[in-house]
Amino acid sequence: MIPTCGTSGPEARNCQPRKALPVLLALFFLIATDGYLTPVAAGRNSYYHIVVLSDLHLPGRNLEAKEKAIDNVNSWSDVHSVVLLGDICDRRGTEKEYDFAKEFLSRLKKPFHPITGNHDFLYEQDSFVQGNRKGFPEERAIKLKRFKDTFGLKEIYYSKRLPHYLLVFLSIDSLYSNHHAEISQKQIEWFAAELNRNKTVPTIVFYHAPLKGTLTGSNVVALFNHFFAAQPAETIKKIIKNNPQVFLWVSGHTHTAPENINYVHNVNLYEGRVLNVHNADMDGRSFVSHAGLGVGTHDNIWTNSLFLYPDRVVIKTYDQKKGYWLEEKTREIQTPAFVRKGSKPATGSLPGPR
């Protein structure tokens, strides 16, 4: 059971509310305090609950903590689905890593939607150089097929239509790029067409890497954001500009811990309109500060939950080790103004996570 107050569901207010100055940021009603985004309290309503698990790096570090996090999610009766934000494999997407990931994720009793990360396919199987050297196109293609086969996918990018939302799941799949997170031309064309077919549906995009310019500070991922960001950046920018129904972009890759100011900050608002929701990794190798170049190691896991109401999304962060919600990180985002009226709710009224 997840305790309440200080550890409450999406409808709760912060236990220690902070003074805030309301500002209008494009289509969002956000509250800005000292350069940070802080929440408007959510009201009671029906919602669709998505748990985001990012950068599992299986088997990797902190395996016992990862197992506990899965067990916690299994115990939450209101979870509709789980998104795996890529880097499911630890290093190079080997057969051994995929076999372990498949066995490990068999313990997850909720429906889940996996997408690729760079460590799932991008690097050479056997490299004699220090670090990760990118593989040849043929090897990348083999590993992308391995990803698809392991998780029983018809394609590694896809969408899911809910009564009030469109969820889009994009995967890194370029066979030739030197970037960490580039989408192929074929997938870009599919993405643009899918959005064009759903112009009036509020849309949430899940992708391993963040949008360019949604991080600040001196971390390597901020300093070299063009290399770590979603690519092709200019094409993605144009697609988003042409599709105002896109209002949330949910990403991993940058291992951004809640203590890092980038986790909840005004810089997360892309082009004044799309909120980039950064997620921490599950491998205990996070950027806990925006200032240091390298990651800090730890044994904690934080996960984000998205509570999709008909007219807004509440984003909450759960400390899997300590067993409570980080209320100061909670945010509420209004859906775009042209959301269709009279749609049926996604679910009946539900309690907070149990």
Image: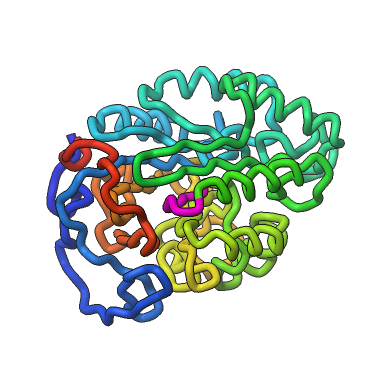
Residue nearest the viewer, comparing 288 with 201:
201
Q: In which quarter of the image is residue 67?
A: top left
**Residue shown at the point (46%, 62%) measured from the top left:** 275
In the image, is residue 58 part of the stretch drawn in magenta? no
**Residue shown at the point (57%, 57%) measured from the top left:** 210
Q: Is residue 5 left or right of residue 32?
A: left
Residue nearest the viewer, comparing 238 with 95:
238
Span shown in magenta? 199-205
Q: Which colour scheme is used?
A: rainbow
Note whether residue 12 is visible. yes
**Residue shown at the point (42%, 44%) measured from the top left:** 299
Q: In this rendering, is residue 8 above or below 81? A: below
The image shows residue 337 at horizontal and vertical percentages of 36, 64
The image shows residue 345 at horizontal and vertical percentages of 25, 42
The image shows residue 308 at horizontal and vertical percentages of 32, 47
Q: Is residue 254 left or right of residue 275?
A: right
**Residue shown at the point (18%, 34%) measured from the top left:** 1
Note whether residue 278 is visible. no
Q: In this view, does 304 lie to the left or right of 287?
A: left
In the image, is residue 204 part of the stretch drawn in magenta? yes
The image shows residue 319 at horizontal and vertical percentages of 32, 47
